[in-house]
Image (tube, rainbow, N blue to C red):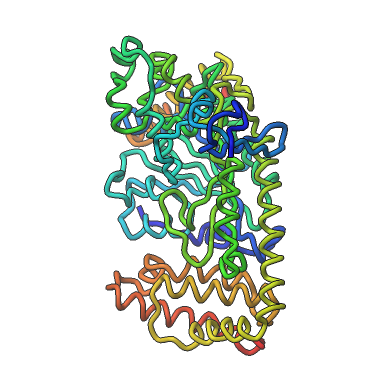
Amino acid sequence: MTLDLSLLPDGGVRWLDAAGAHSDVVLSTRVRLARNVDGYAFTGRARDGERLRVLVQVREALQVLPGLDDSLMVRIDELGPADRALLFERHLVSKELAGLEPQHPLRTGAAVYLSDGLSVMINEEDHLRLQSLQSGFELRAAFAALDRVDRELGGRVPFSYHPEFGYLTACPTNVGTGMRASVLIHLPGLVLTKEIGRVLAGLQQMGLTYRGLYGEGSEVVGNFFQISNQTTLGRSEEDLLDQLIRVVGHVIEREEEARRVLLRDAGYIIEDKLWRAYGTLRYARSLTFEEAMNYLSGVRLAVGLKLIGGLSVYTLNKLLIFSQAAHLSAAEGRSLTESETNLARARYVRRALEEEAGSVG
Amino acid sequence: MLCDNCHQRDAVVNLTTIENNAVRQLHLCEQCAAERGVETSVATPKHPLGEFLQAVQQQSVPASTDAGKCAFCGLTMKDFRATGRMGCARCYSTFEPSMRELLRRVHGSPRHTGRAYRPPKDEVLEKASVLGELRERLRRAIEQEQFEVAAELRDRIRVLE
């Protein structure tokens, strides 16, 4: 099976188009529901035949489901490692489904349905992971789209459900609503003013948690944080969303306040630092992923503070995705060594910024 | 500082609770904290899964309910403690008392208050399984170039759809 992501609108990265609310601070909103098909062992304990039967049963139902009937179905288990890494880097499938972790090798029956902003992963840790991904801070819209698919699909395929515990999942941390709602947020102001520790500690006291750019177990790079609900049971979907909306709204205010303070108390130092970040990205000949992320974080902040004009947030967002190793390899048409990757990354970033350079000032 | 509860012993635990959307700070001694179910002797890990696995390890449910294995998938409580994953939906009923206690510790409540699920009606499931079978037969008929059979199957599928 060959992978052709050009079949998706905007290659599946429309969630980066910076059209949603607060898009200078919030990159994207993601909501996912974990569901299992009744009558089979959960994915990790199921035999190959069971996972394939799950896939067939879900496929029959999804083919006629409004909103997903024109989606692109990808059999992950038939893809090579380069294509699987590409899907993961584009945030379209989890690392576990892509079989990129040593403790979770690729599973027979692993598949994904991709549609504009909606996706269904099959045979992930749970049989089904329904996901909605939207640009900006749009939790209610993301959930509403997902809720429709969940009801339709649940009316055709029997889900595992317990009258007291709710939706049953492989990991007890997802039981109940099975819902994890998260916001990918850029907080350089809070990091620079060293307020971030207090904010993150506050999140945990409010029943929320944070992770890095790639979800569970990933490091925080480039001042990007994913804030999400920690618990899934005992509160309704609406309650969990309201809480997250309230707290993230507060975090956005704190970030904006921190940015104002930086500009007021250290204006020229900040301005110099951020222009240097832009200069490095514009002219460097070799960039590691971490360097690129950190400089991009600086340029993003500069655009938000209106210190650098004429550069679109969408361009910066796309750089986050397309300057990753598997994407650079795909663009070059061959696998690259680490030093080749760093050269290719610098070249890619230079070209992307060159296109808008005429208007930057 | 003295304990907010007994006003006798030194407070060693700061307990933050959220009640009716208001944050409340309580300073408690070790004994009063323990009465409220707060562990003081164990350092709290930062990772959410770490916290969860710790709760799994600390479960103090009588061994008798945890003996045995799930009749559907064969999972034992020992398997669960090793992986942190249940084997199937039936496991939750098999180990219900332990799971209730674990869910209470992980989520603060074992009771689902979100969307109630209405499973598909029997006729929907039956239709889906008949349709699935007809589609499979259609695929095979086309593969074997039995086009008359295929046409007949396609008609039957259309009617059902």
Q: Is any part of residue A158 visible from this angle?
A: no
Q: Is residue A25 above or below residue A208?
A: below
Q: Is residue B95 above or below residue B18?
A: above
Depth check, front residue: B43 or B143: B43
Residue A4 sits in quarter:
bottom left
Q: Quadrant of residue B43?
A: top left
Q: Position of residue A193 (x, y in %)?
A: 60, 68
The residue at the point 66 percent across, 40 percent down is A241
Pick out the residue farthest to the front: B8
Which residue does the image show at 60% across and 52% down from the upper left?
A: A183
Q: Residue at x 29, y 15 (%)?
A: B69
Q: Position of residue A17 (x, y in %)?
A: 63, 64
| Residue at 47 percent of width and 64 percent of height | A221
Total label count? 0
Q: Is residue A119 above or below residue A351?
A: above
- Where is the C terminus of chain A found, in terms of image quarters? bottom right
Position in image of residue A348 (x %, y %): 45, 79
Left or right: A139, with B145 as reference point: right
Q: Position of residue A266 (x, y in %)?
A: 65, 80
Most foreground residue, A262 or A219? A262
- Relative horizontal placement of residue A151, taking residue A173 as reference (left or right): right
